[in-house]
Amino acid sequence: MRIEPIIKVSKINHYYGTGQLRKQILFDISTEIQAGEIVIVTGPSGSGKTTLLNLIGALSSVQEGSLTVLGQELNRANNKLLENVRKNIGFIFQAHNLLTSLTASQNVQMSLALHGGISKREAERKAQAILEMVGLGERVNYYPNQMSGGQKQRVAIARALVTNPSVILADEPTAALDKKSGRDVVEMLQYLAKQQGCAILLVTHDNRILDVADRIISLEDGFLTSSKNTSSNNSHRLASLKGELINHVEDLSLKDFLSLLQQVTGEFQSFLSLIDNEATGKCLEEIIEAITLKITHLLQAERSTIFIVDDTSGNLWSEIIQSNRKKILKVGITAHFGVAAHVAATRECLNIPIALQDYRYSPAIDEQTGYQTRNILCLPILNSQSKVLAISQVLNKIGNNCFDRKDEQLLGEFSQQISAIFDMWCHLQKLHKTSISGKY
Ligand code: ADP
Ligand code: MG
C-alpha cells in the first residue's frame, strides 16, 4: 500500500532577484514528510531554511520543481488554492508575533475567527482549553507584555494549534528563549502535535532540541546535505498511522483500511497504559470516528452510529453520528431503548426495512436530531467471549432501497474485524474510570 506523504518536495530550485542580481538560493531540494512526523531542518544562517519553509507554507510561490502539500500542487497554484492550503497550516515564528493589544485568549481566538464558522462563545471555550493545555490556564487574560518570552511562545503555539492544522511550520521558535524555556516550548509542541497527529517542520540551529525530531535534514548553501532518521518511538508511529487512517478513510480499499486498522490497534496496545488517559481516549475516539465513516461509505448508508456499551451502567452511548460524506455530526446520544438497545440485549442482527412499522424503533432520537429514519441495519460487536462491546447501526440505504443480505454479511464481517478496538476501549474505561466514562 502506498500512502501519500503530507508534504512532498521534489527538485525544488529557488532564486531571489532578477537580471544580473538573480541568485540561486535553493538547489534541487527533494524530501517527503509523513503525517505525524517531526522533522527538524538545521543549517547555518543564510543556508535557505526560511526560504524553504516559506515555500512549503504557501507564503511564497514555487518557481521550479514540484511541491505538494496535503495533496495540492503549489507550483502554479492560484491564490484561492494557496489560501486554502495555508488554512491547514499552523505557523510559529521566531518572534512570537502576538498582537500586543490583545490578551492571550484574544490572540488565540483571532486565529479561530480567521478560519470562520465558529461562534464567539465556542471560540472563547476553545481558546481557554488550548491555553490550559499549554499550561497558561491562569494567564488567559494577560497581555503579551505581562508574560515571559517562554509564555508568549506558548501562546503562539496555542494559536497555531487551536484550529487543528495538519501541518505546523515553526521557524526558530526557541531563538529568543533561554535554554530551559526553549526546551519546554519544544516539548510542548511535540506533545500536542503527537496528540493531534499533525506533521511538524521545525527550523532551528539549536542543537539542544534535535532529539525531539523523528528526522533531521540539513541545508548548506542551499543544498540538502543529509537526512537522518532518528525515529524510534512508538507514539510517533501511532500518530502517523492514525493520521493515515483518518485522512484516507474513503480512498483506502477495505483490505488496506483493515490492515492499517490492525497496525494501529497493535501499536496502541503496546503502550496503552503508558500515556495519559485523555490523550489515549481522544485518540481512540478519532479511530472510532474513522471506522464510523468507513461503515457509512461501505454500506452506502446515509448515516451510521457506533454505540459503546458502558461497562458500569450497561447504557449505550455515542457521541458521533456519521452523516453522508465527510460531515461528522457530533450529538451525544444515550440509548436506553430502541433498536440499538434491543440488539445489545439480544445480540441479534436486526435488519428493519420499514422503521416506522417496527415496534422496536423509537422515534425519540430522530426527534432530537430532526432526521427521518426509513430503514435500519443494526448489529452487535462482540469480543471473543461473546460479550457485547458496542453496537454498529446504519440508517437509510442510499437510493430508497433497504439493506440486503449482502449488507448484513459485510457489516457482520467488518464488525468482527474491528472488535479489538472496542476491547481496548473497555480496557481503557477500566483503567481510567473517571475521565473516559465520566464524560458521558
Ligand atoms: P536561513 O533561514 O537559513 O537563514 P534564508 O532562507 O533566510 O536562510 O536566506 C537564504 C539566502 O537568501 C540568504 O543569502 C539571504 O540573504 C537570501 N534572501 C532571503 N530572503 C531574501 C529576499 N527576500 N531577497 C533576496 N535575498 C534573500
Ligand atoms: Mg531563517
Image (cartoon, rainbow, N blue to C red):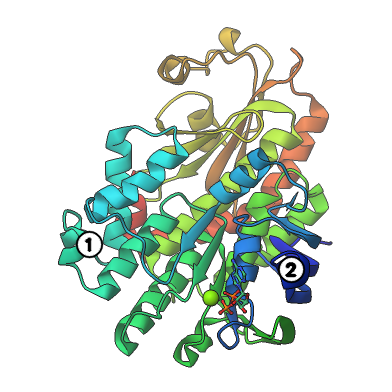
Give, as a three-letter code, the residue at label 1.
Pro
Residue 114 in picture, x, y percent from top left: 43, 41
Mark 2 Cα shell of 10 Å, populated few (<14), some (14-19), many (≥20): many
Q: What element carries label 2?
A: strand
Quadrant occupied by the N terminus: bottom right
Q: What secondary structure is found at the residue carrying circle 1? A: helix
Percent x, y for residue 201?
Answer: 58, 70
Q: Where is residue 47 in the image (x, y as percent from the top left)?
A: 63, 82
Direction front: furthest residue: 20
Q: Is residue 184 left or right of residue 366?
A: left
- Which residue sits at x=29%, y=54%? 99
The residue depicted at 54 percent of the width and 65 percent of the height is: 169
In the visual, does 300 lie left or right of 418? right
- In the rendered image, the quadrant that contains the C terminus is top left
Sequence-wise, the earlier of marks 1 and 2 is 2
What residue is shown with label 1?
Answer: 144
> Which residue has dot 2 on it?
14
Residue 328 seen by the camera: yes
